[in-house]
Image (cartoon, rainbow, N blue to C red):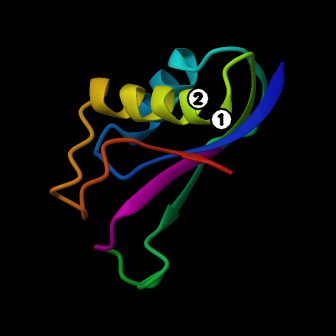
Amino acid sequence: MTTYRVRIGSNAPDRLARVEEAIRRLPGVAWRGPIVESRDWRCPDDPHAMIYANAEVACQSPLPNDQFIALLKRIETEMGRDRSHPTLVLIDLDLL
């Protein structure tokens, strides 16, 4: 069994719900941090800047690294991730 740390993020209008949904879809969540919202780091004082929601979790899984990464990408795809629109991030799952 391997423990993987995953960072989850979204800047969609329903970003909090999307982060929660991603956490629900991840297998073996053993720990989760709080969901934190912040403005785009490039323009933190701009009231019109995009707001991001981010969280971190620890998952326990028997999957090897490559299969766990493939699982993260599959969850992103199922949740509507479209990499052709880099400014709108519906969901982002990164292995830390």
Q: Position of residue 39 (x, y in %)?
A: 46, 69
Element type where label 1 sits in the image: helix
From the image, give the main secondary structure of the stretch colored magenta: strand
For the point 57% across and 25% down, which residue is it? 23
For the point 40% across and 60% down, which residue is it? 51
Task: Give the residue at mark 2.
Answer: 68
Front residue of 55/67: it is: 67
Left or right placement of residue 66 versus residue 50 in this view:
right
For the point 15% across and 56% down, which residue is it? 84
Where, quadrant-wise, is the N terminus in this rendering?
A: top right
Three-letter residue code for mark 1: Asn
For the point 65% across and 35% down, which residue is it? 65
User: Was residue 42 drawn as part of the magenta stretch in this picture?
Assistant: no
Above or below, comparing residue 37 to residue 71 in the picture: below
Left or right placement of residue 46 versus residue 58 in this view:
left
Pointer 2 local density, CA inside 10 Å: few below 14, some 14–19, many at least 20:
some
Q: Which residues are magenta?
A: 48-55
Q: Position of residue 80 (x, y in %)?
A: 24, 33
Task: Give the residue at mark 1.
Answer: 65
Element type where label 2 sits in the image: helix
Q: Position of residue 12 (x, y in %)?
A: 30, 46
Above or below, comparing residue 21 to residue 93 in the picture: above
Three-letter residue code for mark 2: Phe
Left or right placement of residue 25 versus residue 34 in this view:
left
Write down the quadrant of residue 4 in the picture. top right
Above or below, comparing residue 85 to residue 68 in the picture: below
Write down the quadrant of residue 87 in the picture. bottom left
| Residues at marks 2 and 1 touching, judged by CB atoms closer than 8 Å | yes
Pointer 1 local density, CA inside 10 Å: few below 14, some 14–19, many at least 20:
few
